[in-house]
Amino acid sequence: MPRSGGGGGFRSGGGGFRSGERHSHVPATQNASPAPVPASQNGGSRLGRFGSSIADGLGWGASNAVSHRAVDAVLGPRTIHVQHEQVSAPAPSSHYIDSDACSSHNKAFQECVNNHSDDISRCQIYLDMLSECRQSSG
């Protein structure tokens, strides 16, 4: 026998509630698990944290070594070939070699620069003489 009142839907008459009651929506109780406790910033002793760091480093190092061995097993061992090349000295340029004619100008210029390192403009005349000597001899 069917129910009177029209089935399961919204009730239009507010039936089931007393006149003084207010309908408040209360959410269903959820599985309330306690919030996770954050790791303390100062947890453990220094020695314990240091030991933990050492153990962590050993673990990483061991796994790195194992992975290198596995790659070497598949691809073959790594070999390093060192080739020594005979590098000959560059041919000396006449620009850098002081000829006997220009060595006195070069020496005078160097002495001026050493004596007047605060004002090199005083040595311009010696540089000009050295440049002229090199151009005329080279």
Image: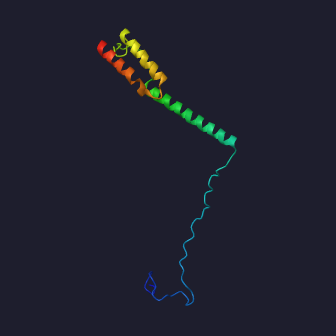
The residue at the point 46 percent across, 85 percent down is 11
Percent across and percent down for residue 59 are 58, 36
- Residue 28 visible in rendering: yes
> Which image quarter: residue 121?
top left
- The quadrant in which the N terminus is found is bottom left
The residue at the point 42 percent across, 19 percent down is 109
Percent across and percent down for residue 127 are 38, 21
- Residue 88 visible in rendering: no
> Which image quarter: residue 119?
top left
Residue in the foreground of this view, choosing between 99 and 51:
99
> Which image quarter: residue 90?
top left
Q: Is residue 90 left or right of residue 45?
A: left
Q: Is residue 42 above or below residue 54?
A: below
Residue in the foreground of this view, choosing between 124 and 18:
124
Q: Residue furthest top?
A: 100
Q: Is residue 35 above or below residue 117?
A: below
Q: Is residue 121 above or below residue 132?
A: below
Percent across and percent down for residue 8 are 45, 81
The residue at the point 60 percent across, 38 percent down is 56
The residue at the point 63 percent across, 36 percent down is 54
Percent across and percent down for residue 68 are 49, 30
- The quadrant in which the C terminus is found is top left
Residue in the foreground of this view, choosing between 11 and 66:
66
Residue in the foreground of this view, choosing between 93 and 23:
93
